[in-house]
C-alpha cells in the first residue's frame, strides 16, 4: 500500500493541484476544487425535472431529437444502498438487451440520446445506467465511490437482467465507458459483445498525458492524487473533471460545450481523489492477452480531439483470442453530434450486435 499523505501536507497538495476556490466554487469552473457535495436539495431528482438535456438535444440532428412519445422510462435499481437511475426502453419482444455506460463527462440520458432510443427503434431493449455520482443516481449517505464500484455495479446489473430472462446481453460505452465495457465484461464473463467509443488503458503514461488537461495534471497531479486517495482528510475532496481531464474536447461545437459544462450531472461534475486514483490505476480481472469473453468493436469518431484512434490501438492490439473490429465515424467528435458519423455509428453497432448474437444457443434473431 502506498503511504498516506501526512495531514499537514493536505493544504500543499490542494495548492499544487491548482485550488483557488472555496467550498462553494462551481464544480464546472476551470480553476476551482469543490470540497463538498453539490446541494442535493437544489439538484433535480429525475430527468423529467431537468432541462439541460433538452438544451443538449437541440445540437443533435433532427432525426435524433425526441418528441414526448420517444422519451425513455425512468427506473431505479437499488445497489448496495445506492439508488441507481436507469433510462430504459423495455421491450419484452426484443431478442437482445443492450446496457449502455457513460464516461466521466456524460451520463445515461446522453447515451439514450445518441444510441439507446435509436436501437430501441430497431427492436432492441436498451438500459442506460447512471453510474454512482453521475446523472440522477443517488449515492448512499457516507459512501465513498471508487471506479471499482462502477465495474462491480455494471457486472451486477448484467446479473440482475440475466435473472429476469435468458436473452443475450451486449454492452456499449462512450469515452471512459468504452473501457468500462471491457472491465465489466472481463469481470462478469456473460456478455455476447462489447462496443466502445475508445478503449483507454489509464495505466499507460501516453494515455494519461494525452487525455489529461495538461502535462502537469498528468505527471504531477496524477501521482499526487494517488497519494491523496490514501489520506482520510483528503481522499473525499473533489476535483472538477474540467481540471482533471481534457473536457474542453468533449464536443466540437463551442456552443454545445457551454451547455455540457453547465451540467453538474455530467461534464460539470467533480469527482473525489479516491475515485480518480482508482480510475487511473484499475487492473482488469483479465488482461487483454487472456480476454476470451466476446468480440469487440471500436466505433472511433474521426474528428475526436480528445481520444484519437492511436490511444485505443495499443490496448486493442493485445486482444488476440477474440475478434476486434474498428469502424471510423466520419466528421464525428468525441461525443458525436455530427452526421454522417452518428448514423454510421448506429448502423455499425446494430450490425455488430446482430452478428454476435445470432450464434446464441437458441439461434433466435432480431426481427
Image: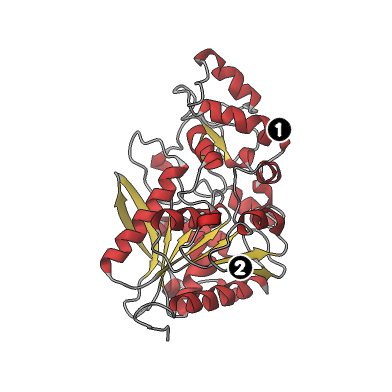
Q: Is residue 311 left or right of residue 152?
A: right
Q: Which residue is mark 1?
A: 216
Q: Is residue 263 above or below residue 365?
A: above
Q: Is residue 146 above or below residue 299?
A: above
Q: Is residue 36 left or right of residue 85?
A: right
Picture coordinates of residue 146, whole percent (x, y) = 44, 40
Picture coordinates of residue 36, whole percent (x, y) = 47, 31
Point out the tag, 2 or 1, that comes first from the N-terminus: 2
At 57% across and 18% down in the image, what residue appears?
11
Kindly indicate the quadrant of the structure image that contains residue 289. bottom right
At 67% across and 69% down in the image, what residue appears?
329
Q: Residues within 10 Å of mark 2 (few under 14, many from 20)?
A: some
Q: Which label number is shown at residue 60?
A: 2
The kind of secondary structure element at disc 1 is helix
- Is residue 51 at least partly visible in the picture? no
Kindly indicate the quadrant of the structure image that contains residue 204. top right
At 32% across and 59% down in the image, what residue appears?
159
Screen quadrant of the C terminus:
bottom left
**Closer to the camera in the image, 8 or 121:** 8
**Closer to the camera in the image, 41 or 117:** 117
Amino acid at each position: 500500500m502506498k503511504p498516506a499523505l501526512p495531514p499537514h501536507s493536505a493544504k500543499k497538495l490542494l495548492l499544487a493541484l491548482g485550488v483557488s476556490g472555496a467550498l462553494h466554487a462551481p464544480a464546472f469552473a476551470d480553476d476551482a476544487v469543490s470540497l463538498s457535495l453539490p446541494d442535493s436539495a437544489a439538484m433535480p431528482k429525475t430527468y423529467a425535472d431537468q432541462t439541460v438535456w433538452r438544451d443538449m438535444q437541440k445540437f443533435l440532428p433532427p432525426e435524433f431529437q425526441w418528441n414526448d412519445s420517444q422519451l425513455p422510462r425512468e427506473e431505479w435499481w437499488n445497489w448496495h444502498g445506492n439508488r441507481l437511475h436507469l433510462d430504459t426502453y423495455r421491450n419484452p419482444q426484443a431478442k437482445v438487451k443492450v446496457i449502455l455506460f457513460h464516461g466521466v463527462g456524460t451520463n445515461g440520458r446522453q447515451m439514450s440520446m445518441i444510441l439507446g432510443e435509436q436501437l430501441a427503434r430497431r427492436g432492441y431493449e436498451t438500459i442506460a445506467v447512471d453510474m454512482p455520482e453521475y446523472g440522477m443516481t443517488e449515492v448512499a449517505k457516507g459512501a465513498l465511490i471508487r471506479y471499482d464500484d462502477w465495474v462491480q455495479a455494471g457486472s451486477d446489473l448484467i446479473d440482475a437482467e440475466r435473472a429476469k430472462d435468458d436473452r443475450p446481453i451486449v454492452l456499449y460505452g462512450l469515452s471512459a465507458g468504452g473501457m468500462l465495457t471491457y472491465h465489466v465484461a472481463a469481470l462478469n464473463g456473460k456478455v455476447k459483445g462489447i462496443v466502445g467509443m475508445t478503449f483507454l488503458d489509464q495505466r499507460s503514461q501516453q494515455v494519461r498525458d494525452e487525455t489529461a488537461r495538461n502535462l502537469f495534471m498528468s505527471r504531477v497531479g496524477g501521482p499526487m492524487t494517488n497519494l491523496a486517495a490514501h489520506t482520510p482528510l483528503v481522499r473525499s475532496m473533489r476535483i472538477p473533471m474540467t481540471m482533471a481531464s481534457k473536457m474542453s474536447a468533449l464536443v466540437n461545437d463551442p456552443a454545445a460545450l457551454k451547455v455540457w459544462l453547465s451540467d453538474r450531472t455530467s461534464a460539470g461534475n467533480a469527482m473525489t481523489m479516491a475515485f480518480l486514483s482508482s480510475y487511473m490505476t484499475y487492473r482488469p480481472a483479465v488482461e487483454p492477452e487472456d480476454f476470451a469473453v466476446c468480440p469487440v468493436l471500436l466505433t472511433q469518431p474521426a474528428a475526436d480531439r480528445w481520444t484519437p484512434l492511436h490511444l485505443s490501438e495499443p490496448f486493442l492490439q493485445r486482444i488476440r483470442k477474440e475478434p476486434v473490429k474498428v469502424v471510423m465515424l466520419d466528421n464525428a467528435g468525441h461525443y458525436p453530434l455530427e452526421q454522417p458519423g452518428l448514423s454510421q455509428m448506429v448502423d455499425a453497432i446494430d450490425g455488430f450486435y446482430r452478428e454476435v448474437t445470432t450464434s446464441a444457443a437458441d439461434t433466435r434473431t432480431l426481427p
